Image (cartoon, grey):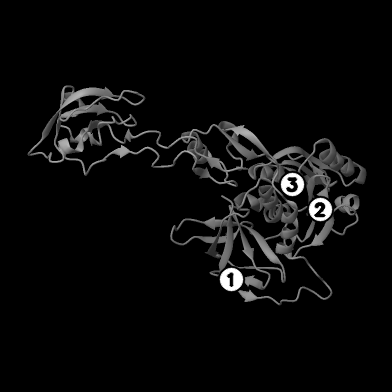
């Protein structure tokens, strides 16, 4: 990589990506919690730790289909010197029986069934001559267990009642919900989902799928933002597109904040220094507009109106996508009480070279070539590079590359930080 000049431009000051994100996160505190049944809690974030209500396992149980025995009875068993035991009971899973086993006696037992108090070991059925079919009355043990306690799952060996199963901030997935259920927990305290309003601005925007007259283009930002918010765990309560009319935008914004009680409002377009910048025109006295040293996505706006965090993003689709990843997504996760706000990042060699903009951190929608498991590579998803208007290239993106501000050129083979989207 060839280093760029550290100078941003005479008389120009920009907020860094870290500075802008710090302002945002200082305002994004976790939303209130609610009690949820496990079936409804998947995808949510724990607001409080989960503690086991019962021991896991609940009781000593068999890890194998086989025979519950006294180890002393079978310690010397082998193929040349088998040991014959009298079968006195049958214990299927779910049974509550606790048969007495005298020396020389055994009970047939199934996986998960409680081990008799008098037994201390389980012999797998594979080590019984003739298996279950020939062991209804007597069991002939041909292989000694490895030791006392073999093939028994001990009560509480996974977790004891009262111990922490998961900490606050844990994202509840299928595995976590299973662990809670196995611990006897049927409800959890989880942070409620953020309520999000999406307002896409632009008189040039027309419904996608229709016919487009001169000067009109398909609307895509509302779709991008609503889908991205859902993927980040939020509930869009408003998804709308408005023209560059102050009154129309103002009404939509007021409806989102006042009537819908949105926790977060995200707009696209209308934040630059042009003549029809509707977001800037309506909200300039309520939120702050900044120039962030990033490309694409330099013009940004953020503030709080009432109880809502308000984001003003640029209008070009790639700028919207990268701005959402850099700023809106971390805020949505913070509102949910998450402790890890960033996606996983790896470092990969560039498959091809490209130029960057001097003095700005570049965010490039990218695709990873995984054909060689030992050497992944990355390239821009769009043939034209990182242009903010190259929306079709987003279809190929499964990551985005981040190029530091002091790098002017990426050369094939250079190692690049790559943020994984899937």
Q: Is residue 253 left or right of residue 185?
A: right
Whether the residues at callouts 2 and 3 have beta carbons within 8 Å, the answer is no
Q: Which residue is mark 3?
A: 221
In the image, residue 329 lies at what x, y percent?
68, 50
Residue at figure coordinates x 23%, y 35% from the top left: 124
- Can the viewer see residue 238? yes
Looking at the image, tell me whether mark 3 or mark 1 is earlier in sequence order: 3
The mark lying in front, picked from 2 and 3, is 2
The mark lying in front, picked from 3 and 1, is 3
- Can the viewer see residue 389? no
From mark 1 to mark 2, how far is it between C-alphas? 39 Å
Looking at the image, tell me whether mark 1 or mark 2 is earlier in sequence order: 2
Q: Nearer the viewer, residue 81 or 311?
A: 81
For disc 2, the neighbor class at 10 Å (few under 14, some 14 to 19, many from 20) is some
Q: Is residue 177 left or right of residue 328?
A: left
Q: Which residue is mark 1?
A: 411
Whether the residues at callouts 1 and 2 have beta carbons within 8 Å, the answer is no
For disc 3, the neighbor class at 10 Å (few under 14, some 14 to 19, many from 20) is many
Q: Exactly how many numbered labels are in the figure?
A: 3
Mark carried by residue 5: none
Quadrant of the frame with the N terminus: bottom right
Q: Which residue is mark 2?
A: 303
The mark lying in front, picked from 1 and 2, is 2
Q: Nearer the viewer, residue 120 or 302?
A: 120
**Secondary structure of the residue carrying numbered label 2:** strand
From mark 3 to mark 1, how far is it between C-alphas? 32 Å
Q: Check the image and name the residue furthest to the left.
A: 80
Looking at the image, tell me whether mark 2 or mark 3 is earlier in sequence order: 3
Q: Is residue 418 left or right of residue 159?
A: right
Residue at figure coordinates x 70%, y 45% from the top left: 224
Q: Is residue 6 above or below residue 237?
A: below
């Amino acid at each position: 990589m060839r280093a760029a000049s550290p100078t941003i431009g005479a008389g120009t000051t920009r907020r860094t990506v870290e500075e802008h994100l710090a302002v945002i996160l200082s305002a994004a505190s976790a939303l209130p919690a609610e009690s949820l049944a496990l079936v409804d809690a998947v995808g949510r974030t724990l607001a409080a730790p989960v503690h086991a209500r019962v021991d896991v396992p609940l009781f000593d149980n068999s890890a194998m289909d086989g025979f519950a025995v006294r180890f002393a009875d079978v310690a010397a068993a082998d193929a040349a010197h088998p040991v014959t035991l009298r079968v006195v009971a049958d214990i299927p899973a779910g049974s509550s029986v606790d048969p007495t086993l005298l020396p020389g006696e055994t009970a047939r037992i199934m996986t998960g069934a409680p081990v008799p108090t008098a037994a201390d070991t389980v012999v797998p059925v594979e080590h019984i001559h003739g298996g279950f079919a020939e062991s209804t009355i007597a069991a002939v043990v041909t292989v000694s267990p490895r030791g006392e306690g073999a093939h028994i799952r001990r009560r509480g060996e996974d977790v004891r009642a009262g111990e922490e199963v998961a900490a606050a901030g844990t994202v509840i997935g299928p595995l976590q919900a299973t662990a809670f259920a196995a611990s006897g927990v049927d409800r959890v305290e989880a942070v409620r989902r953020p309520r999000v309003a999406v307002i896409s601005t632009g008189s040039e925007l027309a419904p996608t799928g229709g016919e487009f007259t001169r000067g009109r283009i398909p609307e895509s930002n509302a779709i991008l933002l609503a889908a991205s918010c859902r993927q980040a765990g939020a509930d869009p309560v408003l998804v709308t597109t408005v023209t560059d009319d102050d009154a129309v935008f103002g009404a939509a914004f007021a409806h989102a904040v006042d009537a819908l009680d949105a926790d977060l409002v995200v707009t696209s377009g209308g934040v630059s220094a042009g003549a029809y910048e509707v977001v800037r025109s309506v909200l300039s006295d309520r939120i702050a507009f900044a120039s962030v040293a990033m490309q694409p996505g330099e013009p940004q706006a953020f503030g709080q109106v009432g109880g809502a965090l308000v984001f003003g993003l640029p209008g070009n689709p790639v700028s919207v996508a990268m701005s959402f990843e850099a700023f809106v997504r971390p805020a949505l996760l913070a509102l949910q009480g998450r402790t890890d706000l960033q996606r996983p990042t790896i470092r990969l060699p560039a498959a091809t070279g490209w130029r960057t903009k001097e003095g700005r951190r570049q965010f490039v929608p990218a695709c990873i070539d995984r054909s060689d498991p030992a050497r992944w590579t990355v390239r821009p998803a769009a043939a034209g590079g990182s242009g903010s208007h190259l929306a079709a290239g987003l279809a190929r993106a499964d990551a985005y590359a981040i190029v530091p501000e002091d790098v002017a050129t990426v050369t094939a083979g250079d190692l690049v930080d790559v943020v994984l989207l899937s």
